[in-house]
Image (cartoon, coloured by chain):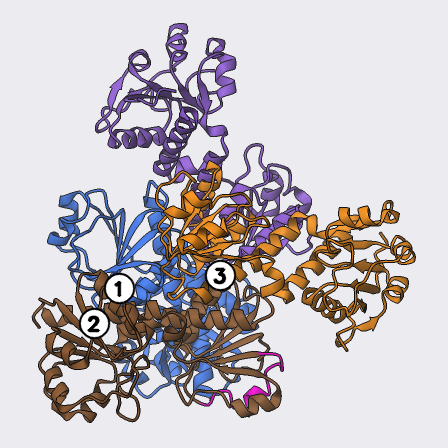
Chain colours: A brown, B orange, C blue, D purple
């Protein structure tokens, strides 16, 4: 890839992309912002149409997710629905495109098939970096909902993937008494070395003030929910369909809440910076 | 003091006293709850009138603050104003009374002059214990207001008393880049040993994402506010009149907010436990 | 596997196996200790010959490593060389054997081919658990060698595998200014979320007080050593042949030291407990 | 005080003063080093006699302690005993002198009575800053002596002054299970907020792997030593006469060790930097 990038098109997306655009401006790039009609100005950025952005930019950045399920651009700040025209896709195919859900994008727009489409959201480093705002968002929700301090609370983190790991570390840091439930013995070992306790899911004791589920599988079915105290606070961070039987929880009087897309909701600025960082990491790798 | 306490009167106060009452119940005490007419029941506690509570209890616990500035009992859950009668004060004077603002209580009710009135809220341990929910409440406010993560943010903590200390430690733990502004060289040294940077108030650089003031003196007057970035988030935790010129802040476009009485607002359960813990610490000391 | 274990043979090994044996005794097992002739007694354990141990035990635990390169049992506390006889191997083949380097053991003693030989040292959880004493041992060495505190030192951790990760976390916890050098972008992201800085190996700046290498590849060749300050302390934790050109280091006046087998050297008690924990984890899994 | 300092005399002392001298050189000062005859050179510093140093310097820095109990200069690197002559004291009286134990110095040399003698070692910030290398030195000793990891060990810290506080925080950070024994209820509250448990000295349970005493009073007399496990490791960090009955400990088979002057022994470089930092803090305060 030609490293000589001067102009960047940021097309569609939510607050994260606005922060991304502003941060690119501050770094000295010319930024073309399209798909944000309801925004009147953003310091330093040029607001323009999709086509102009695609024509003038050296690279294109699309949001998370890039397309809605109906195929339209994910553009909550746009005043009307945006569907890329063939001509626009043809312009896009001529320059590097950084997007999430690349596969869906190319499936919907086969003319992008041979183009330089990079999926920043599918990368490991993107996921690792997002684990921090996810964990912090989860902590914020818990602080908000909980009548006591998180410090000294008995907290269970179910699952020890990237988010489970980051969340456990954060909870230990703020003084919670953390237990990690994990299937793999090596994950339980790693949890212990963070200062948490560890159990497997067969454990009998489910006496916690707060439970965070990160496992996208039916971990908290009725049987397991019955083992929780009725006043347990339960947050389901697992991607849809999640891991909690919310109906059963309601019936049991357990306060269970879905907590999805936390980086975008709780820390859009950081989420935008992470997109920027990952895009430039890709550029660096590709340019080698 | 006779250690043989069986019945405790919890008279007046907010959610903290309700959690206190419930916790005392769980410990096995008979709890008489007065001044909470709008509450219909609290598991395990007996709801009754002030007089009955005073007659039957072995000890009496009053809230924080105990009296409003007009001399009435601080009792937001009561349906009408409560002013202790002479008879009630006479009953109170016969048993150990645990209260905040003991001096004001005795000034308003001189008949308590020779009585066993203990001020739990004036004690060092009470203040130290409350620094944790205060710090956590401040973190919660900041997480809520901030568009980025607290992790990696540039944060200033002004003052290094109990709250400044607890807050700095918590912020370092969650990954913020913390600077402490303190007048005393030994406080700056202590801040450094927590992993923070330290400056004195003469420092020139006031480039922070978030500022917490804990100093009850006009630290953030117009001159100093002008040194902050306009998008700085500023929280004033110092007790009234606080340390921030809010009018000047508004004029400068700085988002400045008062953050008072955080334990009661953000973690009433913990705040109630702290009252309980301190009362029993006094009992232990007095019984020796 | 039959869970009904009463008698355990601990055969060969160093201090770790002695602590393992004592810990098993305290848990209520009958422990037969063989290959420790120079030890006169160990509270609660029965010291006996290899053969007796093999005959009477329900399971057998061999050390790390199990055999020396010449094929003899690794038994530094034995007064003479021990080579398992065919008869001993036949006894061994009849019961579960927990060992390190299972492959080498079976290669040297093919009669164990079909036996229940479990390699505890090859497991992930064993490696994860040992990362803690390894990191702590490395910290101890650095504290010992360094004329300043580790707090505030500039430290580089090269590599972000299990040991690099545990060591980075520990160094951050004690207040060092830690940089992680890692090839993978996701590892660098993870390092940042621990509170460290991260660079790739192409980084120009190699200005550190202390460097820990955990990468078993020639990372610190002459060219890179020349970039370090002459008074840098360099510890090579990578398994042999390691990652440091010690000759070049000496010529450059850099204080470079090998730091191998730290759990056994610095924390044999913990290392023994980890062997026990892993063996029982295997038993639990196999018994399901 | 005239801020225009160009030349500094560092007279007497151990490795700490050598690191101090080198650090002052690196900052651009001309440094005259006296009382170090056995040192042949120190990069950048001028080695000279006491008198020359006193004549030429703008300020004088004396070591910790400044004088031995026999009145001679504390100068372990000197080849023979140094006692300041009247003439030398007269020279000294003309310029700012920074020393430890100022009172003893002036008592021994009354001609310094009206001189500008500043006691850096008596200051709060000096003590706070030294608590970090003291804590780290204590951790190093424990790591060295202990057959298990400090992580997961049961550790008691007796006393919660500056050193007890810094040590408790460090031990919690490395994963030990820390209990603080403190007389004051507010200290116990503060210990809990660091993530430690807290007990008062009347506590019945003294079951620890490692005990650090920081209280300069007979805390660990025979009666209390008898409550410890025989294999407890006990370090006495309290200044002489300390807080441990070593004879009783020996009789009980407890491994008890004195651990004094840890900053100078374990981290002389940091200890030298702390002297420098404190001296310049005094200069800044005095110059205001």
CA gap, disc 2 to disc 3? Answer: 31 Å
**Residue at disc 2, secondary structure:** helix
Q: Nearer the viewer, residue D140 or C58?
A: D140
Q: Nearer the viewer, residue A41 or D65?
A: A41
Chain assignment, label 1: A
Chain assignment, label 2: A
Neighbours of disc 3 within 10 Å: few (<14), some (14-19), many (20+): many
**Residue at disc 1, secondary structure:** loop
Residue at horizontal 44 percent and vertical 63 percent from the top: C270
Q: Are marks 1 and 2 in contact (CB under 8 Å)?
A: no
Q: Which residue is mark 2?
A: A279
Horizontal arrangement in the rendering, residue C19 relative to residue B154 (left or right): right
Q: Which residue is mark 1?
A: A43
Which mark identifies residue A191? none
Q: Which residues are magenta?
A: A218-232
Question: Is D87 above or below relative to A22?
Answer: above
Question: Is D237 above or below relative to A252?
Answer: above
- Residue C83: x percent and y percent? 31, 71
Question: Is C78 above or below relative to A115?
Answer: above
């Amino acid at each position: 890839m030609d490293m000589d990038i001067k102009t960047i098109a940021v097309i569609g997306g939510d607050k994260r992309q606005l922060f991304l655009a502003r941060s690119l401006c501050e770094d000295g790039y010319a930024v073309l912002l399209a798909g944000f009609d309801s925004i009147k100005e953003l310091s330093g950025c040029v607001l323009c149409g999709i086509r102009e952005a695609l024509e003038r930019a050296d690279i294109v950045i699309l949001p998370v997710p890039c397309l809605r399920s109906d195929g339209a651009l994910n553009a909550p700040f746009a005043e009307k629905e945006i569907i890329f025209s063939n001509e626009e896709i043809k312009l896009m195919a001529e320059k590097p495109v950084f997007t999430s859900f690349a596969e869906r994008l190319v499936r919907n727009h086969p003319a992008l098939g041979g183009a330089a489409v990079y999926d920043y959201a599918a990368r490991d480093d993107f996921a690792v970096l997002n684990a921090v705002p996810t964990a912090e968002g989860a902590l914020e929700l818990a602080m908000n909902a909980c009548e006591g301090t998180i410090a000294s609370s008995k907290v269970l983190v179910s699952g020890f993937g990237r988010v489970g790991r980051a969340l456990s570390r954060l909870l230990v840091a703020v003084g919670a008494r953390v237990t990690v439930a994990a299937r793999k013995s090596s994950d339980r070992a790693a949890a212990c070395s963070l200062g948490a306790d560890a159990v497997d899911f067969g454990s009998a004791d489910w006496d916690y003030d707060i439970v965070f589920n990160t496992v996208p599988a039916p971990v908290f079915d009725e049987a397991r929910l019955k083992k929780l105290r009725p006043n347990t606070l339960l947050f389901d961070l697992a991607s849809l369909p999640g891991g909690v039987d919310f109906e059963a929880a309601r019936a049991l009087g357990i306060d269970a809440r879905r907590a999805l897309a936390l980086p975008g909701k709780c820390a859009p600025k950081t989420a935008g910076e992470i997109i920027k960082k990952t895009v430039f990491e890709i550029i660096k790798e590709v340019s080698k």
